[in-house]
Image (tube, rainbow, N blue to C red):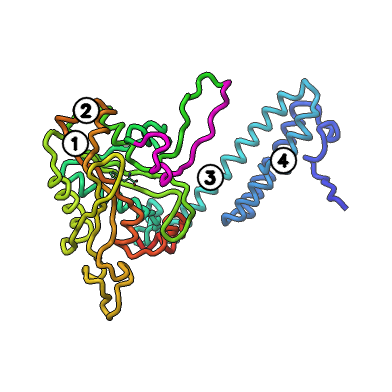
Amino acid sequence: MPNVDNSTTAKTLADLGAGNLTEINLLFRVQRKDFDLDVSASCSDFSALENLRVKWIGRRSGVLAKITENWLKPAASELRPIVGQALNELKAHVESVLEERRRALEADFVARAGLGKEGLDLSLPGVIRPIGSHHLIRQVFQEIEDIFVSIGFSVVEGPEIETPYYNFEALNIPEFHPVRDDMDTFYLELPPLSDKNAAKTPLLLRTHTSPMQIRTMEKQKPPVRVIVPGKVYRRDNPDATHSFIFHQVEGLAVDTDITFCDFTGTIEYFVKQFFGSGVKTRFRPSYFPFTEPSVEFDVSCPFCGGSGTAAGGGSCSKCKGAAWIELFGAGMVDPAVYGFVNYDAKKVSGFAFGIGIDRLAMLKYGIDDIQVFFQNDVRFLRQFP
Ligand code: PHE
């Protein structure tokens, strides 16, 4: 059976026979007294205080809510202002007493716990908020940036969505050139022809950071010394050494007197800074349409000291006994490229390189599966704080 509330606040003023100022004020005075009695009877701790708060000013069935519902709302219009004013006074009284009690209880608690004036115990251990750390790939970017910045390169970044012109043509890779097969990539769906504002050329996710060579040279005159860290995309099937997204740092140096020696010297300096001064470098002929001559840089295996044999005998598992590990592609900028950016190929020369960061990080930190970089497994990430 539902509870029947027989208290005065469940009835209307008409039911109670209160029809004038004196009677109404009397009713409110009784309520106020009840409240004061309640407070002095039980308000010795926080939970008693909370019970009082709910009983008196609880939104749904607190005494004041009931007075509003049953006394104020149905009151005859000439009585309503009187009821309203008395109700406001009662409410102010209840709220200020409860607040006063809350402060007193708090002060009492602080004093009993010996917490001093501010309620602060400076001898308690602090709140430890674990701060995250940079992803290993980001850390390796940083290492590489530091090395190149220290020898006069600046860091620039470019768009991951490119036009075929910057990704291919201006890098001396015309349409139907077979090297495009290696860079099969993701084209973005074209907007409908009805969209007059849409770009006319198709767009693609860049397959390398090399488009930034062009964008940089378009913007500035020689001398140019930049590196370009960033994400690149290719339609590769994921396995331990392939991923459809990976990271590169492009490098480009162009000036009036840059020689092949400057080129190999710079690369050698970088590799020794990155892997340690004990490693050796070598280059082998290679091919890229935008460099001539093109090379592939190798480093002597940092794990077996370039011997090809493991410490305990047998062949080194990292370089598979080869003593060398292939690092990245590079070369002297092909004069044809200068034609696309209005540089005078007779006056300037330079070199470019494209370092695969994931591969470098795997080598340096002994990681055997590229996929771990993208899986966000904290057990992996925590190993590189
Ligand atoms: N862009 C080439 C690649 O992704 C690497 C490269 C960059 C080679 C610069 C030469 C010069 O394979």
Magenta segment boundaries in residue numbering? 173-194
Residues marked 1 and 2 touching at CB (< 8 Å):
yes
How far apart are labels 3 and 4 at the CA level? 21 Å
Residue at which label 2 appears? 343
Give the amino acid at mark 3.
Answer: Glu
Q: Earlier in the sequence, mark 4 or mark 1?
A: 4
Residue at which label 1 appears? 254
- The total of numbered circles placed on residues is 4
Which tag is nearer the camera, tag 3 or tag 4?
Answer: 3
Quadrant of the picture in which ligand 1 is shown? top left
Q: Residue at x 32, y 57 (%)?
A: 361
In-image side of 147 versus 358 (left or right):
left
Which tag is nearer the camera, tag 4 or tag 1?
Answer: 1
How far apart are labels 4 and 1 at the CA level? 93 Å
Name the secondary structure under disc 4: helix
In-image side of 277 versus 230 (left or right):
left
Residue 264: image location, x then y, percent? 16, 49
Say if the magenta span includes residue 36: no
Q: Is residue 154 visible?
A: no
Residue at which label 4 appears? 30
Q: Residue at x 19, y 56 (%)?
A: 273
How far apart are labels 1 and 2 at the CA level? 10 Å
Q: Earlier in the sequence, mark 3 or mark 1?
A: 3
Which residue is most to the top? 196
Respond yes or no on whether mark 2 lies under 8 Å from ligand 1: no
Give the amino acid at mark 4.
Answer: Val
Q: Is residue 186 visible?
A: yes
Give the amino acid at mark 2.
Answer: Tyr
Q: Earlier in the sequence, mark 4 or mark 2?
A: 4
